Image (cartoon, rainbow, N blue to C red):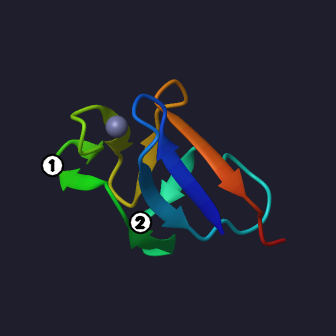
Amino acid sequence: MLIFKCGACRKKLIRYHKIGPGEVHRCHKERIDKYFGAEIRADGLYCSCGRRVGMNRGGFYTMDKKSVTYSGTKTS
Ligand SMILES: [Zn+2]
């Protein structure tokens, strides 16, 4: 599981089930395990501080590398 945090205010955003190799910043919606401070809007995922942290791409979000940090382990 990976925990994404807002790079601006350090608030926890989502808990994400990362499987296998590949782009960490592409978050498939069905693998988002839990929403913390993240707010879902039409165009993406926002932190409660107002910063947009992810772009809505349909089945997944592309997380903004400048706006998020993450920690945790990948499941291989
Ligand atoms: Zn924030």
Residue at 35%, 47% in the rendered image = 57
Q: Which residue is mark 1?
A: 42
Q: Position of residue 76 (x, y in %)?
A: 84, 71
**Element type at mark 2:** helix
Quadrant field for ligand 1: top left
Of callouts 2 and 1, which one flags the residue occurring earlier in the amino acid sequence? 2
Q: Quadrant of the N terminus?
A: bottom right
How many circles with numbers are drawn on the protein? 2
Which three-letter amino acid code belongs to the residue tagged 2?
Lys
Q: Residue at 55% across / 48% down in the picture?
A: 26
Q: Residues within 10 Å of mark 1 (few under 14, many from 20)?
A: few
Residue 16 location in percent, x, y? 55, 65
Give, as a three-letter code, the residue at label 1. Ala
The disc at residue 67 is: none
Label 2 crowd (10 A; few <14 / some 14-19 / many >=20): some
The residue that mark 2 highlights is: 29
